[in-house]
Amino acid sequence: MAELYFLAVRLVPGPEVGFIAFQLAGLLLSLAITVALLAFLRRTGRPAHQAVWWAWSPLVAFEAINGAHVDALGTALALAAALLLVGGRTLGSGIAFGAAVATKLIPVISAPALLYRRPFRFGATAVATFAVVYVPYVLASGWAVLGYLPEYLRSEGYDGQDSPRFALLKLVLPASWAAPAALVLLLGLAGYVWRTTDAARPWDGQVLMIGGMLLVVSPSYPWYALLLLPFVVLSRRYEFTAIAPVLALMYFTGAEPNGPLAARLGLGTVVVLLVVATVVRRRRQHAVA
């Protein structure tokens, strides 16, 4: 899906336009997400200004527009999948979600929150969409369709060895245990989200899954947090916006001697913030009840 997007951006304005074409495409995608959020907020009677958590976010300006990361396309499709599913359009939701995962694999982490309504139909449609997009490349290239992914996983330290990945887990576990422990934690979180998702508010679970993945895995790329922001708006879990600045800090300090310490302090602070915000929110809910 990403390759089709890149091709379209190159062909429509012409190859001579250069990188600015991708920045303009990022701007259009960001505006489309803003419009979708505003439409939902208006339809549900919520204040329109809540959309500024996406529309005015520096993360969007720097990463979706200036950096022109394809994550913006995956985010737009993942948001469409959630909104379509809430509207009862399971088929369209599955297509959008499959396209989101075909754009970049990261959106798959939000799947547990979307399996509450006709899960077989949704899942089958998503898998079929993913296959339709990927099969031509597999037939043409074989395993080369994976591209740089295997080397990326090794170079980024996703094997759990000496790297900033799994920064919090390495505080309490040997490095070799970090990746398996992360898998167990995320599977447990996925089960919890799947069992507790409110059909009218799947984004509550999506925020937990995406935010939990970013905290547990601790990638040092702030644009990975683009996927989180629209669901922060929908769920009103604004404390999760603290994750993006920490990922940016990790990006800029990763090669520094104190980079791992900065990552652990930043991520640990976010965890404390999330716990405090959750406790305060539940106390307020109990007080109102």
Image (tube, rainbow, N blue to C red):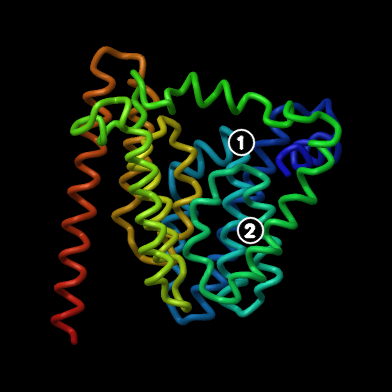
Per the rendering, the mark at residue 198 is: none
Q: Amino acid at mark 1?
A: Ala
What residue is pinned by disc 1? 68
- Say whether disc 1 or disc 2 marks the residue closer to the N-terminus: 1
Residue in view at x 63 percent, y 56 percent = 77
Residue 15 position by quadrant: top right
Placement of 188 over or under 248, stated as above or below? below
Residue in view at x 21 percent, y 39 percent = 268
Cα distance in 3D space between marks 1 and 2: 21 Å
Placement of 23 over or under 48, stated as above or below? above
Label 2 Cα crowd, 10 Å radius (few <14 / some 14-19 / many 20+): many
Residue ranking furthest to the bottom: 289
- The answer to which of 225 and 131 lies nearer the viewer is 131
Residue 52 position by quadrant: bottom left
Residue 164 x, y percent position in the rendering: 34, 25
Placement of 268 over or under 74, stated as above or below? above
Indicate left or right for 127 with 244 as reference. right
What residue is pinned by disc 2? 97
- The answer to which of 238 and 24 lies nearer the viewer is 238
Residue 71 x, y percent position in the rendering: 58, 42
Indicate left or right for 3 with 273 as reference. right
Tag 2's secondary structure? helix
Label 1 Cα crowd, 10 Å radius (few <14 / some 14-19 / many 20+): many
Of the 4 image quadrants, the one containing the N terminus is top right
Residue in view at x 37 percent, y 22 percent = 252
Indicate left or right for 137 with 273 as reference. right
Residue in view at x 46 percent, y 82 percent = 45
Residue 186 x, y percent position in the rendering: 38, 49
Q: Amino acid at mark 2?
A: Phe
